[in-house]
Amino acid sequence: MGDRELTASELVAAYATGELSPVEATKSALQNIEDRDGEINAYCLVDAERALDQAKAAEARWRDGNPIGALDGVPASIKDIFLTQGWPTLRGSTSIPVDQPWEVDSPVMARMREAGLVVLGKTTTPEIAWKGVTDSALAGITRNPVNPRMTAGGSSGGSAAAVAAAMGELSVGTDGGGSVRIPASFCGIVGMKPTHGRIPLFPASPFGPLAHAGPMARCVDDTALLLDVLALPDHRDPTGLAPPISAYREAVRRDVRGLIAAYSPALGFVDVDPEIAAIVQSAVQSLADAGLQVEQADPGFADPKDAFDVLWSAGAAKSLDAFPPGSEPRVDPGLRRVWERGHTYSAGDYLDATAERAALGILMGEFHTRYDVLLTPTVPIPPFEAGHDVPPGSGMSEWPEWTPFTYPFNMTQQPAISVPAGRTESGLPVGLQIVGPRHSDDLVLAVAKLLEEVRPWAAP
């Protein structure tokens, strides 16, 4: 497809003119998987035959002038957390039996099929998507396409690596504590966690009020196009929101110059790597130069890690309790510790954490009466060596210790997006996070688009 991989938007434009076909685009993505995934390990399942059948059907629709959507025929992938009819959903675990009927599509997969996306396969995840990097006994270690020695982040690391390496233009991940935004930052792509309930989920996640699904792409326009597909309602999610009142693909064009942004370089409590801080500061200055009114201000909350841990650990324990008897020795050792800790929390502890989550949401709601968006680094450190849950030699013991910019906004259920802001001297990507008030997904996308325009980014 030339010297530069096309975005989904560019592919669709080429389909419309007949310059390219969905079959050609799908073959290119499959070739990239063959060439690169042996090293990167972004996919745990690839179904080339099924993908090519979907691409041929899309090609016929475009030829007849009857595409079924704005992404018809675009190669994509889906994280192996979502149910997919005809494919196993093993969630990165060796404890889930493969030999069972796989007859149900999650809402995400159903919407992707209805929109004509060519789903190449399923991407890797740590066991039950429990941590901020991507490795498992089932699938092995997923590596960063920019530098395969480094982690791709997680838990949607397979999706981020696939998109960054042009092994499909789009992917859908899950985000319960940063799992879309962390790997988006590490791999140099765009990853969005919409408002809670904006993308319906089924079955309900054990991580409950923290659980989100999110689109991942190489540019903001593609992210918005995919969100338009995924945001359609599904009766199986009782917490799902009403359909959007306008298209997100149009919202990215909104003029946000003159809006007021708070820039919080450390949220008041985070230790940020100096190189990351400088890159994000420069990106924020670019937004200010473009007309966004930027004021440095912290939201004013203390690190909610303890409350997050109660909600996260209790959810993990509930999920793992459903595993077959005898699974415990096979569970990721770090996850097993979380499982055990989850059982130590009482209903009172959970309700106290829920109350803290609500108070945090109220505080952020008030904050956004003064500031349209909040700007922060996405992750306070650069990507580190793959195969570790925390940076080696850091003295840390668990992944939330190095992801303090992401999980607070799962607790508040706000929309948040990571957009490439620059690279370290060693060439590793750095993301800037844009957070908006609940239900302002359109605004978050529009500010992200402005950043993309003033700081053009070449995907790895």
Image (spheres, rainbow, N blue to C red):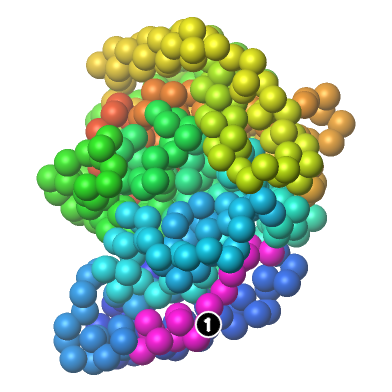
Give the quadrant of residue 103: bottom left
State the image coordinates of residue 7 (x, y, percent, origin top left): 42, 69
Magenta-drawn segment: 41-56
Please tell me which residue is depicted at 45% across the width and 82% down the height of the picture: 50
Residue at mark 1: 48
Would residue 151 be found to the left or right of residue 99 on screen? right
Please tell me which residue is depicted at 51% across the width and 52% down the height of the picture: 81
* Crowding near the residue tagged with mark 1, few <14, some 14–19, many ≥20 C-alpha atoms within 10 Å: some
Per the image, is 52 magenta?
Answer: yes
Would residue 72 be found to the left or right of residue 433 on screen? left
Give the quadrant of residue 165: bottom right
Residue with the most extreme left position: 245
Can the viewer see residue 196 in this picture? Answer: yes
Please tell me which residue is depicted at 44% across the width and 86% down the height of the picture: 52
* Above or below for 122 versus 129: below
Amino acid type of the residue that numbered disc 1 sits on in the rendered structure: Ala
Report helix, strand or loop for mark 1. Answer: helix
State the image coordinates of residue 184 (x, y, percent, origin top left): 54, 49
Would residue 51 be found to the left or right of residue 346 on screen? left
Residue with the most extreme front position: 325
Would residue 425 be found to the left or right of residue 200 on screen? right
Per the image, is 134 magenta?
Answer: no
Please tell me which residue is depicted at 32% across the width and 54% down the height of the picture: 107
* Above or below for 457 versus 282: below
For the C terminus, the image quarter is bottom right
Can the viewer see residue 163 in this picture? Answer: no
